[in-house]
Image: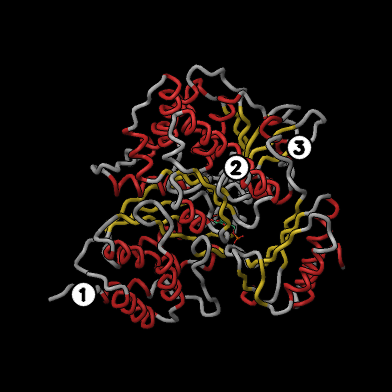
Amino acid sequence: MAAQLPLDDIARLADLHPKPGHIRFQYGTAGFRTLGSVLDSVLFRVGVLAGLRSKKLDGKTIGVMVTASHNPEPDNGVKLVDPRGEMLEASWEAHATSLANAASTEDFLQAVDAVVKNAKIDLSKPAKVIYARDTRPSGPSLVASLEDGLKAIGAETRDAGVTTTPILHYLVRAINTKGTSAEYGDDSEDGYFKKLSGAFKQLVSGKPALPPLVVDCANGVGANAVEKIVPYLGDSLTFIPHNTATATPGALNNACGADYVKTTQKLPPSLANELKSGERGCSFDGDADRLMYFYIDARNQFRMLDGDKIAALVAGFIVELVKNAGLEEKIRVGIVQTAYANGSSTKYLADRLPVRCVPTGVKHLHHAAEHFNIGVYFEANGHGTVLFSPETQGTLASYEPSTPAQSTALKHLRNLVQLINQTVGDALSDLLLVETVLAHKSYSGVEWDSLYVDLPNRLVKVLVADVRAFQTEDAERRLVSPRGLQGKIDALVKRYEGGRSFVRPSGTEDVVRVYAEAVMKSQADELAFRVAGLVYDETGGDPATRPKEFL
Ligand code: G16
């Protein structure tokens, strides 16, 4: 007889985690994300779903990360990680949403059964799941709910404890590739730190050590990772960690971290006296999958080096190595960006390399980057990585260089394959990558920054009655609904020199985001607030949050 669902176990445990009646959950850009206090039922159901996903994939290990990343501390969230360490396959997002919204235990059992039938899951297969959480106070109880779901479906589990999102992604891939030719590394935090630090030390060997680096850990789990990697790095790089108060209530992502830096374009106040003219620093976000750099210039002004600048720095370095290795005929490097990429960065990169624009969300960038031999993807917010296709990794492994210069470049490329976390954006791995390039080029923030000059830009949020009323096309660069709004935005944009603006619904917060750029800062600000005002007026936003400049 074919294996059956353990309905009694699922029902008994599901009863302990009832769905709040008034909420509709959506598996979005970064999984489920909302107030931690309403996520109990979602976590239980995600546990069941993770078990089913593993069964579907013949018992491969699935990851579950409990985090709300850059969101404020009361929020929490959960996302699934597929076996190669990438985001959950898009077709399963609908299954996640349907399970999360089943109104009662009975409805939930039916929804589970529907997923089993729909996805043709062989229930006799094993289920293996590894999970982790960030440092949010709501984490432990949500993990307990998740564990109930995993128990209900009979999954074999591994608790990776409190760790960063990218380490969890690394562990998933390491577990699933163990003993294969694609082995990714030892499936432990120690394996991760050894892999990254080993490659970094090789890459910077013989280069003068860079000055110590100020790291703003956003009072999140990245603080633990930074502390742990220090002994592995030895004297190859020195950190000055800040915002490491992971146990202080309300501190997470508060006036610090990568999102703060990107959206306010300011230095976190806590670092005000830490950086002197010429010095560089960087910020992680709450789960350490985003990285922003900055430095203080000769006039004591804060200068931001965002994901676009990281992409330009890293892509330039990789292209040079590929050329120096004599591999430019075989290896094509490409870039993937989103609509948020600064217009100057797109121009700078497109003059040198193929560039693709895709909708926001790492999964979109990741998939597009897989089409290149080496795909460099970064969102402007600092979320990104570099992918080396399996063929390219094969080429790098077997290539026979014919000069000492080629041999050196090849060695560097091989080490980059080890240094870069290719499963997802990883603040720590990206930091080591940036430091590698700075060391090789003898760049300070100034030289790096001068690759191109950012167009002034502004990002604002608008709270509206119904975010779902906003739909986009053309990689989120144009609105299709509410109808007529795009035409008004176009008319406004035309009045600003170098003007560009777009409006899109956030996938992680209940807001609409408005981006604008123009040749002058005051114009970019004005355009952003005018477009935000249009959005507000069109759609009846909350009066309390109407963009202030236009009240
Ligand atoms: C997540 C996604 C990113 C996305 C960001 C903001 O980041 O992984 O790809 O750029 O949300 O998305 P939105 O503008 O739709 O809210 P994180 O770091 O929060 O996981």
Residue 47 image position (x, y, % from top left):
37, 64
To which residue does mark 1 refer? 4
Quarter holding the C terminus? Answer: bottom right
Residues 448 and 89: in front is 448
Circle 2 SS class: loop
Disc 3 within 8 angstroms of ligand 1 (CB) = no
* Residue closest to the eye, 212 or 218: 212
Name the residue rendered at 35%, 37% in the picture: 395
Q: Distance from label 2 to label 1 (Cα)?
A: 56 Å
The answer to whether residue 254 of the structure is visible from this angle is: no
Q: Residues within 10 Å of mark 3 (few under 14, many from 20)?
A: some
Inspect the image, locate mark 2, and give the three-letter code of the amino acid beneath it. Answer: Arg
Nearer to the camera, 229 or 300: 300
Please state which amino acid type lies under the numbered disc 3. Phe
Q: Indicate left or right for 235 with 265 as reference.
A: left
Residue 76 position (above or below residue 158): below
Q: Is residue 132 above or below residue 530?
A: above
Residue drawn at x 65%, y 33% as measured from the top left: 281
Q: Amino acid at mark 1?
A: Gln
Q: CA distance from mark 3 to mark 1?
A: 61 Å
Q: Is residue 403 above or below residue 463?
A: above
Q: Quadrant of residue 272?
A: top right
The reply to whether the residue tagged 2 has its Cβ within 8 angstroms of ligand 1 is no
- Mark 3 or mark 1: name the one nearer the start of the chain: 1
Tag 3 or tag 2, which sits nearer the N-term? 3
Q: Position of residue 167 (x, y in %)?
A: 43, 44
Left or right of 8: which side holds 225?
A: right
Q: CA distance from mark 2 to mark 3?
A: 28 Å
Residue, disc 3: 302
Q: Which residue is mark 2?
A: 352
Tell me the quarter of the picture where residue 257 sits.
top right
Q: Residue furthest left?
A: 1
